Image (cartoon, coloured by chain):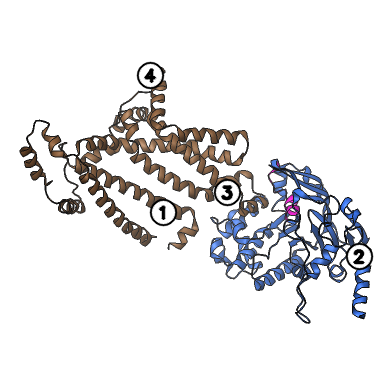
Chain colours: A blue, B brown
Amino acid sequence: MTTELLNVEQLRTHFFTEKGTVTAVDDVSFTIHEGEIVGLVGESGCGKSVTSQSIMRLYDEYMVEYEGKIEFNGDNLLNYPIKKMQKIRGDAISMIFQDPLSSLNPVFTIGKQIAEPLMLHHKKSKKEAYERAVELLALTGIPSPEKRVHEYPHQLSGGMRQRAMIAVTLACEPRLLIADEPTTALDVTIQAQILNLMRDLNNKLQMGIIFITHDLGVVAELCDRVMVMYLGQIVEEADVKTLFEKPLHPYTRGLIKSIPQMTGERKSELSVIKGNVPSLTNKPKGCRFSTRCEFADEKCLEEMPPLKTHSDTKKVRCWHYEEIIAREEGGHVHASST
Amino acid sequence: MGIYILKRILSLLPVLFVVSVVIFGIVHLTPGDPASYMLGEEASPEQVNELREELGLNDPIPVQYLNWLGGVVQGDFGDSYFMNQSVLDAIFSHIGPTLSLAIVAEIIALSISIPIGIVAAIKRGTATDQSVMVVSLMGMAIPSFLLALFLALIFGVQLGWLPVAGYQPLSNGLWNHLQYLILPAISLGAIQAALIARMTRASMLEVLNTDYIKMARSKGMKERTVIYSHALKNAFLPILTVIGATFGALVTGAVVTETIFNIPGIGQLIINSIERRDYTIIQGIVLFVTLIYVTINLIIDLLYGFIDPRVRLDSK
């Protein structure tokens, strides 16, 4: 096993809002190793973006409170004063955002936006930084980078903007890259190119990547390990292969079942998870998924299950997952025999 | 860019034409007669009629309009009926004080409003923010003539720091010039400051919530760089629009303030001219003011292009 890069322990992120305190991330723990791509999956509002922005501490400090530990290279980032945090951001940890148009500053050239962190963190001169910016644009596969470096975001196509943003985040060769739905706003063909690019860069630069997405197809394509989040908690963690082959948590099973299948007859209805995600201000008392889980019983409604270690590579947060799997598999056998 | 500017200037012509028709119509259709003012109350109707004939006021209004427009196109705005000078001379001898006042007022307004707008946006929801909002609301609510009277009473009469009223041209020395302008400029600039402060706050709040600001922070940029470079440059566009609009209002809307502080500007000129039905002067001033307004707007649009590459590159 390679070296540990990031270790998040029992992270809780509370927001102070007009309606009271809202806990968007509730007891999240995970580890990222060097060179590893880890997917963070869940529906909108499950807390995956909040988790990633908590790692960078990007929320206004007066409206948020963090609990737990975020250890990066052995130091707890939550204890850092903001000045020290600014030194880490963009240098050792950097972040790709979802929408490349709204995340690049419209009034600055691409070159300036790539050069900024280099001049700030690596004390490069303006000339050196721009030269490096051209190299980085070339690295991300942008054609005629020496011309593009002087252009503004609105002059680039969607795919190129996302490449430019990746160039910005790679400028200082971060050890950890957080990619928050980097392909969601892009066309499918561009998506594939960006995913390939990220895999290449990961191979070349050996950085750890947290890849946030709601697209399980992308996860299967790119990630080594996956964490599934639901309503502020990790409900299942596994390596990619076993997650798809043998999902444990009823929520994960629902998610995987709801991927449309292109094989076989297309007459059967698309499987969906019933109900809606409850709001953060109205969380179920016991298991967070209990309101939508067809297997939920008294215990599920009353008591929160812990994140149990199932095997070396798998963890799951469910009281009854073993019985449920046994029952479902039994059911399948039964159904096919009649 | 050159073609763009030319196009914009050409597009001003229809605006000026419409304004000229409207102002000519309003002036000539309102009751009152310059001829009878000129001759005084004792004049007989025959005398008045004779003078009207002489001034061309008995011609049909369209004919009068075309006669006037013919002159204007050649740069001749006509002569004042009452003052022994041409309209252009009258305007130019009065525009200096008005422009000085407007510029000083705008400088005062900007130097207060933009910093406090930014601070309010950064500290949104705090006591600082709320007091900025309350003070700016008061600034907008207090009529400028009332503020002018208070200021003159306190700083002019009670404390005696600044002259109560009057005007000295810049040629008499900078301080002489400025000391007469400070009080009227504050009373005029207060409303503008309030408006600009609110716009700055709103615009900054919007920009500070955008993804590219989050991105700038995630690159490790210092908070100062984020706010004054990344955010302000984007937030400045709507602020610029308000500055343009308020500056136009300063040039043209200082009538009351000029009267209170006895500043011989455009405001006084137009008030006197309306009273005397000095048609040519009224028409000349309104057209001139329109020209100032549209020119300011043009400058603002060009500044837009200067700040925002999306505007600049699209207009190429």
Per the image, the residue denoted by label 4 is B157
Q: Magenta stretch containing residue A59, yes or no?
A: yes
Q: Marks 2 and 3: which is nearer the front?
A: 2
Residues rendered magenta in the picture: A49-61
- Residue at the outermost front position: A338
Give the chain letter at badge 3: B
Callout 3: 10 Å neighbours few (<14), some, many (20+)?
some
> Could you tell which of marks 4 and 3 lies nearer the N-terminus?
4
Residue linked to disc 2: A324
Please state the chain letter of the residue tagged with numbered disc 1 in the rendered image.
B
Which residue, given by chain and number where applicable, does mark 3 sit on? B206
B6 or A10, nearer to the observer: A10
Quick check: marks 1 and 2 in contact, CB under 8 Å? no
Predominant secondary structure, magenta span: helix
Viewed as shown, does residue A276 lie left or right of B315?
A: right
Q: What's the mark number on residue B302?
A: 1
**Badge 1: how crowded within 10 Å, few (<14), some, or many (20+)?**
some
Of label 3 and label 1, which has the lower sequence position?
Answer: 3
The residue sitting at 86% across, 67% down in the picture is A247
Q: Amino acid at mark 3?
A: Glu
Q: Position of residue A290 (x, y in %)?
A: 84, 57
User: If you read the primary sequence from the N terminus, does the residue marked by circle 1 or circle 4 appear first?
Assistant: 4
Is residue B253 toward the left or the right of residue A151 in the image? left
> Relative to A127, is B25 on the left or the right?
left
Q: Residue at x 46, y 36 (%)?
A: B140
Badge 3 and badge 1 in a common chain: yes
Q: CA distance from mark 2 to mark 4?
A: 89 Å
In three-dimensional space, the C-alpha distance between marks 2 and 3, rounded to whole angstroms, equals: 49 Å
Disc 4 residue crowd, few under 14, some 14–19, many 20+, Cα 10 Å: some
User: Which image quarter holds the C terminus of chain A?
Assistant: bottom right
Regarding residue B40, the answer to whether it shows in the image is yes
In which quadrant of the rendered image does the N terminus of chain A lie? bottom right
